[in-house]
Amino acid sequence: MFEKIHTYRFNQILLFLSILVIISSCSLKLEDVDFNGVDSFKIEKIENKLLNLRLGVSIDNPSSFSIKVKSFETDLFLDDRLVGHAKLNEKVKVDRKKEDVYSVPIQLQLEDGAYLVLLKTALKDKVNLHLVGFVKGSIMGISKRIKIDETQSIDGKNFKFDSGQK
C-alpha cells in the first residue's frame, strides 16, 4: 500500500517537472512593450479634488501574449509641478502583436493648487506630462510590477472638459 502511494506521488512530481521543462523550453518570445506616448487627454468628471480622466495611450505590444494591466499608481506632474496622484479605474487589456491607442480610465486625486495648474496648462500649446510610479500587469496569470518614470510633451489643447451632458 505504501509503495503504491509513493509511486503515485513520484509520477505526479515527474509529470509536473516534465510539463515545466516543456513550457520553459518552448520558443515563447516575450518582448518588451513600447509606451509610445499619450495621444489624448480628456477630463470626464470633476468632483471636489477628484478627477476622472480618459487617456488615449499609444502602446506597441510585439509579444505573442496579451497583457492585462491590473493596476497603475503614479504621481502626475505637468511642467514639473505635482498635480496629483493617479490610479487606474478599471483593468485594461493590451492586445498581442498589435500597436494601438488604448482608452485608459484614470482617477486623479488632486493636490492643493492643482486647478490653477490645470487651467494654465489648457492655455499652453505644449505641456510636459511626467509620470512617476508603477504599473502592474499580468500575462497568463503571472503578474509583474514595473516602475515607471516617463515624460512626454503633449498638446495643451488636449485638456478638454466633457460635462457629460448631451
Image (cartoon, helix red, strand yellow):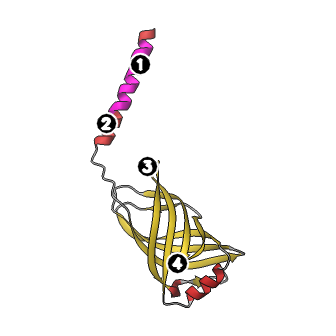
Mark 3 vs mark 4: which is more N-terminal?
4
The part of the chain drawn in magenta is 4-18
Q: Give the residue at x 59% y 64%.
A: 89
Does the magenta portion include 7? yes
Residue identifier under label 2: 21
- Amino acid marked by disc 4: Asp
Does residue 125 appear anywhere in the picture? Answer: yes
Q: Which x, y percent locates residue 59?
A: 41, 68
Q: Is there a contact, CB below 8 Å, between mark 1 and mark 3?
A: no
Q: Position of residue 133 (x, y in %)?
A: 52, 63
Mark 3 highlights which residue?
Answer: 140
Q: Label 3 is placed on what type of residue?
A: Met
Indicate the amino acid at tag 1.
Answer: Tyr
Report the disc number at residue 8. Answer: 1
- The relative height of residue 41 versus residue 73 in the rendered view (above or below) is below
Give the SS element for disc 2.
Answer: helix
Q: In the image, residue 101 lies at what x, y percent?
A: 44, 72
Main secondary structure found in the magenta portion: helix
